[in-house]
Image (cartoon, grey):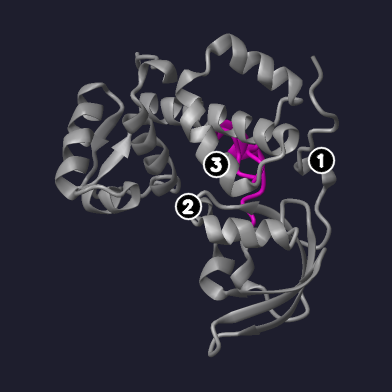
Amino acid sequence: MARHHDPADISTAAQEYLLALRVMCGDGRQATTAHLGRRVGVSTQAASEMCRRLTADGLLETGAGRGVILTPAGQAAADAIFRRHALLEWLLTSVVGLSWAESDVEAARMQGALSPRVEARLDDLLGHPETCPHGNPIDAETARRRPAGTPLSELESGSRATVLRITEEAEDDAGLLSYLEARALTPGAHITVLARSESLDSLTLEGPRGRATLGLRPASLIRVVPGEADPSLFHRVLAPIRG
């Protein structure tokens, strides 16, 4: 039977690795220690040492090649950490009023200190969100129930769509998050693709706050659904929390 790991018992550094692996292994791929080290900003040697610790704790295992993958216990721990992070982001953006980029940094600082009791209370007060504010499913079970979406970069000129989510990979780019938030290109936003050019590596769209232009690479990190999506896909914190 897989061991249960309370996020509060996992070091801040280990939480960062598990969240990174959650993204990198999200579609069944393996992650090499070199790629993992680059993602978290450490040397390959440091990443290898952390992977050995996480493997000893039953959270990682070696894949068919030289890569590592999350074990079921590791996936559960990573989902639990992401859930806490997502709840804190909802609190910080919808109640405290921080920007997406600011809330991501602050949530990372706070998530390790959040007790299960406070986590459950936050979940109640925020209306039980199934995604983070960027639209990413809060756990693997939720992901299976929701549409995967199509990369915005694949839409042709004239296409109409609804922004479904800003992928976790895009969340690493604070500048991109700030731009999308400023243009109101958030989950639930209706858009129309005005022009798409491979040669110019750009996509221009009409959104809630007028025209916006993205490179095809950033656009590939945004998932959309055709036409107008079901509004129930998008969580909203309807009222400020009061004491």
In depth, the one of 148 and 77 nearer the eye is 77
Q: What element does badge 1 sit on?
A: helix
Q: For the point 78% across and 57% down, which residue is it? A: 189
In the image, which residues are magenta? 131-149
How far is mark 3 from mark 2, CA to CA? Answer: 9 Å
Q: For the point 37% across and 16% down, which residue is it? A: 9
First reached walking from the N terminus: tag 1 or tag 2: 2
The image quarter containing residue 176 is: bottom right
Kindly identify which residue carries mark 3: 104
Question: Mark 3–mark 1 contact, CB under 8 Å?
Answer: no
Kindly identify which residue carries mark 2: 172
Whole-percent x, y for residue 188 in the image = 78, 52
The image quarter containing residue 51 is: top left
Q: How many residues crowd mark 2 within 10 Å: few (<14), some (14–19), many (20+)?
A: few
- Amino acid of disc 3: Asp
Residue 131 versus residue 12 in the image, above or below: below
How far is mark 1 from mark 2, CA to CA? Answer: 27 Å
Residue 87 versus residue 101 in the image, above or below: above
Whole-percent x, y for residue 242 in the image = 81, 19
From the image, state whether disc 3 or disc 1 is nearer to you: 3
Question: Mark 1–mark 2 contact, CB under 8 Å?
Answer: no
Q: For the point 81% across and 63% down, which residue is it? A: 227
In depth, the one of 147 and 44 nearer the eye is 44
Left or right of residue 219: residue 207: right
First reached walking from the N terminus: tag 3 or tag 2: 3
From the image, state whether disc 1 or disc 2 is nearer to you: 2
Kindly identify which residue carries mark 1: 232
Instruction: Point out which mark residue 4 bears.
Output: none
Residue 155 versus residue 48 in the image, above or below: below
Q: Quadrant of the C terminus?
A: top right
In depth, the one of 73 and 42 nearer the eye is 42
Q: What element does badge 3 sit on?
A: helix
